[in-house]
Amino acid sequence: MKNNYLVSVNNFEEINEYKKVGINTFLFALEDFSIGYLNTFTVEEINNYVDSYVLINRLLDCRDIDNLKEILPRLNVKGIVYEDIGVFQLVKKLNLNLELIFFQNHFGTNAQSIKYWLDKGVNAVFCSNELTYKEIELLVNSNKNSVVVQVLGYNQAMYSRRLLLSNYHEHFKLVNKKDCILEEINSKMHFRAVENTYGTVLYNGKLFNGLRLTNLDNVRYFYINGTFLGVKKVIEYLNGLKTDCDDGFLEKETIFKLKGESK
């Protein structure tokens, strides 16, 4: 098994199980600064695993940045996986010795934009999960050892700062749930929804399995989102024991020609 897997964990008990199969690098969702993950962790808890990364994927305001000024210097980890560029600016301003991995779910779509951030001092960039296999291969080869590729998990479809589940349940006088499965009436598509104080994330209802992407060389990390899965299922997929999943856009281009011609 490759040794450059990066796995988001749901609890500390999972870590020893992952280590048994050679996975040693973990991603911890930081308490009060992450969204879309069922469990979050404090700085003190995370600092027990110095070779791992902290996830900060909320969109931040000025108050959040001020709070991070006190929190980031206390981190004793390898680096930060972040979405808001305010995190990048703050790490540079404080001159912290932390790796930076830029993770905007739908924006790592071309070699030029990835190179732009690498030139600014970012260590690696996640590529978008809406790309084909060939497109991902091109990005990886154009920016060797600087691209993170998602290979297993439920892919994020949408992030809103609104409390969509709370508002819905309140309007229809239903018991409020922070984690549920939704169905779009017309298409019958399913989404997994997770809400916390800072907003709501919708994941595609089909589990994405892009493990054949691990055939690519020069990838910084192969990312596994363990949310909704747990360590047992992740290891089963890694060992090829489960196949009930979807390959997302790996063979489906997302650019289509509209009917007719512009005049």
Image (cartoon, rainbow, N blue to C red):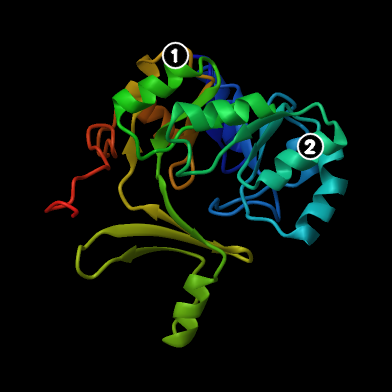
Q: Residue drawn 63% across and 51% down?
A: 34
In contact (CB < 8 Å): disc 2 and disc 1: no
Find residue 95 and report its horizontal and vertical position in percent.
85, 31
The image shows residue 54, relative to residue 193, as above or below, that is above
Q: Residue drawn 44% across and 14% down?
A: 1
- The residue furthest front is 263
Q: Would residue 180 appear left or right of 212 to someone viewing this image?
A: right
Find residue 155 and report its horizontal and vertical position in percent.
40, 45
Q: Would residue 259 appear left or right of 202 to someone viewing this image?
A: left
Of 102 and 27, the residue lying toward us: 102
Q: Residue drawn 69% across and 56% down?
A: 60
Q: Residue drawn 78% across and 53% down?
A: 65
Q: Secondary structure at mark 2?
A: helix
Of 212 and 231, the residue lying toward us: 212
Quarter that holds the C terminus: bottom left
Q: Is residue 214 visible?
A: yes
Query: For the image shown, how many numbered marks are present on the structure?
Result: 2
Of 209 and 217, the residue lying toward us: 217
Could you give the CA–CA distance between mark 2 and mark 1, rounded to whole angstroms? Answer: 33 Å
**Of the two numbered discs 2 and 1 in the rendering, the one whose residue sits closer to the viewer:** 2
CA neighbours of label 1 inside 10 A, class few (<14), some (14 to 19), many (20+)? few
Name the disc covering residue 1, or none: 1
Amino acid bearing label 1: Met
CA neighbours of label 2 inside 10 A, class few (<14), some (14 to 19), many (20+)? some
Name the disc covering residue 32, or none: none
Q: Earlier in the sequence, mark 2 or mark 1?
A: 1
The residue beneath circle 2 is 91
Q: Would residue 47 appear left or right of 185 to someone viewing this image?
A: right
Amino acid bearing label 2: Val
Q: Secondary structure at mark 1?
A: loop
